[in-house]
Amino acid sequence: MVAAVRVHEYGGPEVLKVEDVTLPPPGPGEVRVRQTAIGVNYIDTYFRSGLYKAPSLPFISGNEAAGEITALGEGVTGFALGDRVGYVATLGCYAAERNVPVAIAVKLPDGVSDEIAAAIMLKGMTTQYLLRRTYRVKPGDTILMHAAAGGVGLLLCQWAKHLGATVIGTVGSEDKAELARQNGCDHVILYRQENFAERVKEITGGKLCEVVYDGVGKTTFMGSLDCLAPLGVLASFGSASGPVEDFSIGILAPKGSLYVTRPTLGTHTSRRDWLDEISADLFEVVASGAVKISINHRAKLSDAADVHRMLEGRGTTGAIILTP
Ligand code: NDP
């Protein structure tokens, strides 16, 4: 039996139940991993609340973790006992041990600890595909990142700055504003107090942004469109404030022939060569020191419900790690 956090019915943080579950031996193409660090992500709250549906109930929560391989399933090649691996998996990560398909496992280089891996496999690979594949940020670009002090936010601001962009970030408090500045934000907007689209217009002298990265969703989507220069790209990649409401595609014409995409990490890592390319690029910027990882909250797996409360209450910054 292994300790895990399961959801039997969708709901608030209280539906996260700490339980002992049976773990079968790894199946063909799987490895068993003793997990040492588990990443917490906003997507974990979507699955818990039922905004995203799990394949079945009950399910083990959690979508990102790292640890050590302790058993190999049939037909596994390229991985050995004792290898350290990190992964993004659809569910099953809030557990002391789990079986992982090697198709999604990435070997961790020496410079990347298990804890760092659990903080960056999901948030950092997302940052990579947003900055390098969704819109390829180049020196001289001006970008807008919402929730700039969040898990993805702190990584994206640093990496975009490293690529030579001018970075504008929105944040929910003065403390978060300071943190965003320390992590590469050239301009910070307190979007609970100020109209962020008007501020972006002022900051850029009316030129606006080549790309807006919007993981906030419902409350920012329309304003984000107003922050884009002609032919600009809106990457609407999350819904922390709720799902984006339906809109008419026709509005993209007068706003400057804009592009809108709703990308997912799942699509961008759906091919093994893409997964390898994205993770290698991520490990490189981390190893070089260009992107530093802020793990600002650590908790025991059994405290997952409290951690969800804090995350949904906008009380966290940077990455959050659970340990079994
Ligand atoms: P964060 O650490 O960024 O936490 C969410 C932040 O959103 C909060 O801290 C808060 O920051 C802001 N926010 C704005 N409005 C609300 C609201 N009404 N309720 C709660 N929070 C709000 O989370 P993550 O880094 O884990 O994820 C950021 C976003 O990226 C999420 O939407 C997530 O779903 C998305 N995502 C998408 C992926 C993809 O591939 N499509 C992959 C990974 C993440 P503030 O107080 O500063 O406003």
Image (tube, grey):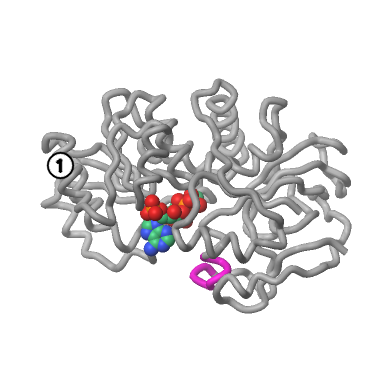
Question: Where the C terminus falls, by quadrant?
Answer: bottom right
| Disc 1 residue type (three-letter) | Lys
**Percent position (x, y) of residue 301?**
71, 58
Q: Which quadrant would residue 131 be assigned to in this image?
A: top left
Q: Which quadrant would residue 22 be assigned to in this image?
A: bottom right
Q: Residue furthest front?
A: 175
How many other residues sit within 10 Å of disc 1, few (<14), some (14-19) or many (≥20)? some
The residue that appears at 43% across and 37% down in the rendered structure is 156
Q: Is residue 54 left or right of residue 18?
A: left
Q: Which residues, given as a range, are shown in magenta?
A: 46-52
Q: Is residue 235 visible?
A: no
**Percent position (x, y) of residue 256?**
15, 46
Magenta stretch contains residue 250: no
Rendered position, 224 above or below 137 = below
Q: Is residue 18 left or right of residue 244?
A: right
125, 44: nearer the viewer: 44
**Percent position (x, y) of residue 120?**
58, 40
Give the labeled residue for mark 1: 201
Magenta stretch contains residue 47: yes
